[in-house]
Structure formats: structure tokens, C-alpha cells
């Protein structure tokens, strides 16, 4: 004979079971929500890294650096530098920076260093400046003036092709580094085939941009880092060291030519992440 279960007893145990299941579901949902919140908070804590190319390069030069930074969870932007005028280029980057919410690490290569020096002035979201084989001008300095001892600045007509452009003021032109000079003085330390491709795809800068005086420097109030290429022939190491010491930058020496971001992207990325962590 089968033993019959009273309906009230069955209902009691069913209620208990449903309550336990509901409790487990709430616990799991809460745990997942907390984990997601922790992940989102960690991601939000990382600053946005903005990379600014210099003259005779373009934003593709940052590819190796970008890949490494993105792997570490950083949001990275590399807006193209117009290379038309120091004031205009700086204003373009400054406007771009205003579209970014939260902290920023601003990085500049070569002439891009002069641009970030001006673009970051007055922007409280920029927490660190990183100069990569770059100009770090004081007020009134020009790129060519700082670089007066380099091979490129010593004889402009010998090293540059002067190309006219629409709307140019008298005496102004776009400067292209001659291919042979590019490989020897700008892309030294890189394989010849790679240097030849970079020479063919170089982005010219106007003569007026590299000879224009710089404004109030952002490095006066923003902590700075400097990647110094020890075999750089475009901006000699001694000039780089002078600028890096003048701005009280944290200096990292890399055995590379002027394109250390291409030759040693891991080392450059490491300096950028160090700046990010130190100012977050």
C-alpha cells in the first residue's frame, strides 16, 4: 500500500525549494554584477592614450605601440597631425582632446612634441606628456631652431625637396626629405627596405610650421616622460637630452634612430604605460 502525502506538506517543501533556488539565482546575479562592476571600474581607471605623429611620418608609425597598448586594455587614439602650421596643428589636436572624457596621456613624436607642448596647455584632463625623439620647446623656440646642429637643419636645400602648395605664403613650401637622406638620417637603424617604404609614404610638413615659435609650454605644469633615441641623426641625442633635462622629464634611453616607435615599439609602449600608471 502506498503512503499518501498530505497536500499541505507537499506545498511546504515546494515553497522551501523555490525559495532556495531564488536565493541562489540572486546570489549568482549579484556576484556577476559585482565582477562586471569591478572590471568596468578597472577599465575606466585607465587613461586614454593619444598619439601624435611628427613630420615626415604619419600616424601609421604608431602601429606596433598601439597593438601593445590595446593588449594592456588602454583606449588609444592616433589622430593625424595636419603638419600645416604649429598654431593650427596644435589647435586641431587641442580640439580633439576636448572630445575625450577622463584622463589623457598625450604622446608626441619629433615635431609632434612641439604640437603636444602647445595643445595640452590649459587642458586639465592631460595628466602626462610623453616625448618620443621629440621637440620639447620652451616659449619662443622653433623646431628648426632647436635642431640647428642636426644634419637635416644644417642645409635645408641639400636635404629637403621644397614643394609648392596652394595658398602658401611667399617663401613657404612643403618639405619632403630626400629619399637617400631619409634612409640615412631619419630611418637609420631600420632595415633598408622598410626605410625605403617609409620614405615613399612620408608626410611633408610646411617650412613655416617647423620655423614657427612655440607658445606657453604645457610641460610647465604637466609631468613629462622622454624616450631618447641614442643613435638619432635627425634630432641628435645631445639636443634631446638638453630638452628632456630642461623639462625635468623621466628619461628612457633606447638604442634606436629617429623612429624608435617603429624600431622599438615595446620600449616606447612601456614608457607610456609607466606614465599612465604614475599619474592615475
Image (cartoon, rainbow, N blue to C red):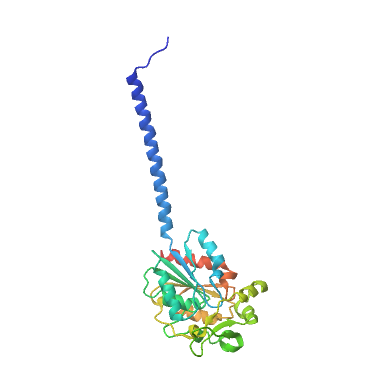
Q: In the displayed image of the protein, which residue is found farthest to the front?
A: 166
The residue lying toward the viewer, choosing from 53 and 89, is: 89
Could you say which quadrant of the image residue 276 lies in? bottom left
Residue 103 placed where, x, y %? 40, 65
Residue at figure coordinates x 40%, y 44% from the top left: 31
Residue ID at (52%, 59%): 71
Quadrant in the rendering for residue 13: top left
Asked whether, in this view, residue 194 is left or right of residue 112, the answer is right
Q: Quadrant of residue 229?
A: bottom right
Q: Is residue 248 visible?
A: no
Position of 21 relative to 69 (above/below): above
Image quadrant holding the C terminus, namely bottom left
Say which quadrant the N terminus sits in.
Answer: top left
Instruction: Report whether residue 129 is seen.
Output: yes
**Residue 133: percent from left, percent from top:** 53, 76
- In the displayed orientation, state which residue is furthest to the top: 1
Estimate the x, y position of residue 226 in percent, counting from the top left. 49, 73
Amino acid at each position: 500500500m502506498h503512503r499518501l502525502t498530505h497536500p499541505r506538506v507537499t506545498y511546504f517543501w515546494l515553497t522551501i525549494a523555490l525559495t532556495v533556488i531564488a536565493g541562489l539565482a540572486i546570489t549568482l546575479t549579484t556576484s556577476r554584477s559585482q565582477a562586471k562592476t569591478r572590471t568596468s571600474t578597472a577599465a575606466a581607471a585607465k587613461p586614454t592614450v593619444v598619439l601624435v605623429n611628427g613630420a615626415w611620418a604619419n600616424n601609421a608609425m604608431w602601429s606596433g605601440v598601439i597593438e601593445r597598448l590595446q593588449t594592456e586594455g588602454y583606449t588609444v587614439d592616433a589622430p593625424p597631425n595636419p603638419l600645416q602650421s604649429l598654431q593650427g596643428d596644435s589647435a586641431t589636436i587641442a580640439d580633439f582632446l576636448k572630445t575625450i572624457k577622463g584622463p589623457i596621456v598625450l604622446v608626441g613624436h619629433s615635431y609632434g612634441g612641439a604640437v603636444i607642448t602647445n595643445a595640452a596647455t590649459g587642458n586639465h584632463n592631460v595628466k602626462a606628456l610623453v616625448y618620443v625623439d621629440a621637440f620639447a620647446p620652451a616659449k619662443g623656440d622653433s623646431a628648426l631652431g632647436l635642431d640647428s646642429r642636426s644634419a637635416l637643419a644644417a642645409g635645408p636645400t641639400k636635404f629637403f625637396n621644397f614643394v609648392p602648395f596652394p595658398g602658401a605664403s611667399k617663401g613657404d613650401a612643403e618639405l619632403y626629405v630626400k629619399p637617400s637622406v631619409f634612409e640615412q638620417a631619419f630611418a637609420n637603424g631600420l632595415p633598408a627596405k622598410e626605410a625605403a617604404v617609409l620614405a615613399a609614404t612620408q608626410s611633408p610638413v610646411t617650412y613655416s610650421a617647423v620655423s614657427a615659435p612655440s607658445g606657453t609650454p604645457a610641460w610647465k605644469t604637466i609631468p613629462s616622460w622622454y624616450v631618447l633615441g641614442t643613435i638619432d641623426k635627425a634630432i641628435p641625442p645631445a639636443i634631446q637630452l638638453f630638452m628632456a633635462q630642461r623639462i625635468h622629464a623621466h628619461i628612457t634611453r633606447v638604442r634606436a634612430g629617429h623612429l624608435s616607435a617603429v624600431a622599438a615599439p615595446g620600449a616606447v609602449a612601456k614608457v607610456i604605460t609607466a606614465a599612465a600608471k604614475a599619474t592615475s
